[in-house]
Amino acid sequence: MTVLMAAELQLATNIAADRIVNTFCVVGDTGELLENAQAVADAITDHYSDAPATPGISTINEYLSDDLVRGSAVNAIKMYDIDDHLDGSPHGSPIWENTWILPTIGMGGTSLPHEVAVKCRLEAFGRAAAPVETPDGPDAGTAVDRPQQRLTGGVYYGPLQSVAVTQADGFARPAPTFRMVVVNAIKDINADLDALPTIAYLGVWSRKNANVHKVEFAKVDDAFDTQRRRGIKPSTATSLDVHFT
């Protein structure tokens, strides 16, 4: 069985539409995944707030913006059955859901624009050997195929605060400690899933191929990414008549 876990983080507006959503593809035995739905959910939500197994580093939560609600069970975690929708067709309502709390811990700092994010790239087994492009295959459309891209997924972490930023070579870049926290936290998800009674693991979902491949590597580079749809709406504007007669 393949499920899509959607972790929703609530912004301080407390409007449901103003939620940051990260999705994670999990593969496992059908019955066991459903019987252990809360444990699967915990593996996802805990990776935000628990220090990874690697010692001496902090949590993802400590780098997230103070604009997120903490200490209240307003965040949602939802499980969707996508077995019959691996081609990307609508998967309908969740088959299981619950709420979760982002702890009230932080490293301080100033909230960054909500569009600013750090992407953790998830690479499936076989990606390294896969070609970047090949002639068009039997899939829909006539464009060239991109096998390597179809074995690549990602999670965009944000909104962030200024402690996630460092200056390097004259540029603002994601702090090395934050990058290390993220990849180790992803590893901990797989460790928690592996500890379940069933064989479960994170996967990279290729809608084009309509299949899922097991994640091998998690990587975070030293450049920020942009998620425009996370930007807040303007509340006012500054206007000035600048023409001359």
Image (cartoon, rainbow, N blue to C red):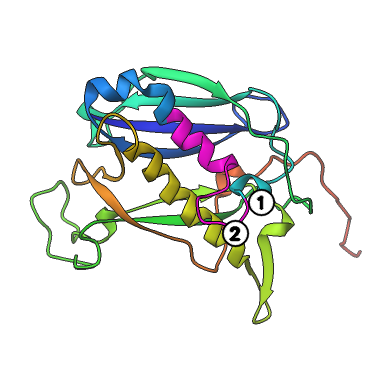
Q: Secondary structure at mark 1?
A: helix
Q: Residue, x 60% and y 43% (percent of image)?
A: 230
Please state, as top left, top right, bottom left or bottom right, where the N terminus lies in the image.
Answer: top left
Residue at which label 2 appears: 178
Q: Quadrant of residue 4?
A: top left
Give, as a single range, the part of the protein colored magenta. Answer: 41-58
Q: Residue furthest right?
A: 245
- In the picture, the disc for residue 74 is none
Q: Residue, x 78% and y 50% (percent of image)?
A: 108
Q: Residue, x 44% and y 29% (percent of image)?
A: 41
Up-down relation of residue 13 to residue 149 (above or below): above
Residue at which label 1 appears: 63
Q: Amino acid at mark 2?
A: Phe
Label 1, residues with CA under 10 Å away: few <14, some 14-19, many ≥20 = many
Q: Nearer the viewer, residue 110 or 87?
A: 110
Place of residue 113 in the rendered image (x, y in percent of width and height, measured from the top left): 69, 51
Up-down relation of residue 5 to residue 151 (above or below): above
Q: Residue furthest front?
A: 55
Q: Amino acid at mark 1?
A: Tyr
N-terminal-most mark, 1 or 2: 1
**Label 2 near label 1: C-beta < 8 Å?**
yes
Distance from Cα at disc 1 to Cα at disc 2: 7 Å
